[in-house]
Image (spheres, rainbow, N blue to C red):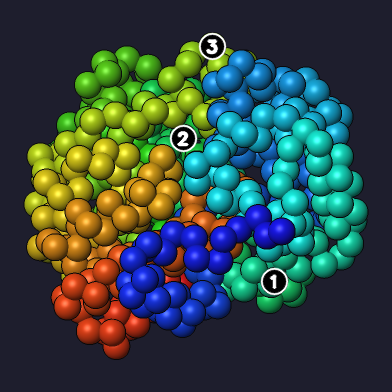
Amino acid sequence: MALLDEGRLFPAEARTRSLARSLYDEVKALPIVSPHGHTDPRWYAEDEAFPDPARLFVTPDHYVFRMLFSQGISLDALGVPRADGSVGETDGRKIWRLFAQNYHLFRGTPSRLWLDHSFQEVFGLDVPLSAKTADYYYEHIDACLKRPEFRPRALFERFNIEAIATTESPLDDLRWHHMIRQSGWSGKVVTAYRPDAVVDPEFEGFAANVARFGELTGCDTSSWDGYLEAHRKRRAFFKQYGATSTDHGHATARTENLSAQEAARLFAKALADECTPDEADAFRGHMLTEMARMSLDDGLVMQIHPGSFRNHSAAMMARYGRDKGFDIPTRTDYVRALKPLLDAVGTEPGLTVIVFTLDETSYARELAPLAGVYPALKLGPAWWFFDSPEGMRRYREMTTETAGFYNTVGFNDDTRAFCSIPARHDVARRVDCAYLATLVAEGRLGLEEAGEVAHDLAYRLAKQAYRL
């Protein structure tokens, strides 16, 4: 009994379904380009076996544990590490049983698609997960994880990953990327420059982070000029480890193009922890424009993903730290917010700024029209809360008429859950092929053209946009 329907996500109407399947058959085996993600580079560096099924599927995946928490199951019971490094439940089998008993909570969600794909395609399981099959699943997956073909590098190659980017802070020493380089392994794992810790005055420990930033670069980061030079040096260091992009997660899409004097004034206030919320937002916004100017010089692709109220629960943030499922979408303005940056660099054809959103209402009204005219601007894929069949379909419907396909950048999986990578790309390929098949069936696109677009969306656009 297969866990997955072979025709999943294809249109119900017979002719369109057949067209979608034929398009999908041409792209399903293409290599995976994963240019934006959060897998741990240590996995590839040390290439050690994953410890157990619970620590592979449950404790690192906020899509999984946030759903369980919403139903009253504590993160301690799921083995999610606390901010101080301690852990509640450490018995992997107990965690797995709790997960299996509540697997029904994922019905109809993209997480269910990703998990079932991993269970069937990676581990060869063919019975549904439930309380009754929990131990069978655990023992089967655990036995697999002890075999060399299930270690991180072997899975990387089995998943047909051509390139993957991890995401690191400027304060990271990139030791794991260095170890990967020294190992002689041929897998392409690159870093990406995520400077939030040293550009956001509201980031915990901002002043200490900036001081450490100066120590790492040998720059005087107490001065505005020295601080900017530290970014240039650190970006160059990240490029040595394959970085082709920067990544900016800000609360709003606000950008500014301040004078050097005003920027230096705000920077001094930020170091002294004296910024008002508006001044902190203005400083973050100006740093986006500074990062864009640096990208013109060093060629790094810039990614902006605003609009998340991060760590919405102060109590959970204090107990468990960041990235524990409490980042919530907010309304986001792009037309006015991006204007200072676009006035400064938006018509530069050598610059690529990829913009994501958690506010779907902005796609047709703002983002597609902006990307449809500014050469520097490209649209990131549907992602995060909209990394789903419905979100992907709506994305194509709302953006194609104004931005086309070629002002978008293909797909990225943005995941910490390693085994979900091929599952997520498979969902994206199926949904895109279903959309293209509809255009063919309606006489709006030729079949040969649709095949070319399917290939571009599945592979070429991501590789081209991220310069991989």
Which percent across, then down, holds residue 124? 76, 61
Dots 1, 3 in contact, CB < 8 A: no
Please provide percent x and percent y for residue 229. Answer: 38, 49
Q: Identify the amino acid type marked 2.
A: Ala
- Mark toward the viewer: 1 or 2: 1
Residue type highlighted by circle 1: Arg
* Nearer-the-camera pick, 6 or 383: 6
Residue displayed at 57% across by 45% down: 112
Viewer-nearest of labels 1 and 3? 1
* Secondary structure found at label 3: helix
Q: How many marks?
A: 3
Residue assigned mark 2: 197
Relative image position of residue 357 (x, y in whole percent): 30, 44
Q: Quadrant of residue 212?
A: top right
- Find the residue positioned furthest to the bottom: 448
Q: Which residue is mark 1?
A: 158
Residue 463, image quadrant = bottom left
Q: CA distance from mark 2 to mark 3?
A: 21 Å
Compared with residue 265, is residue 11 higher up or lower down, i.e. above or below?
Answer: below
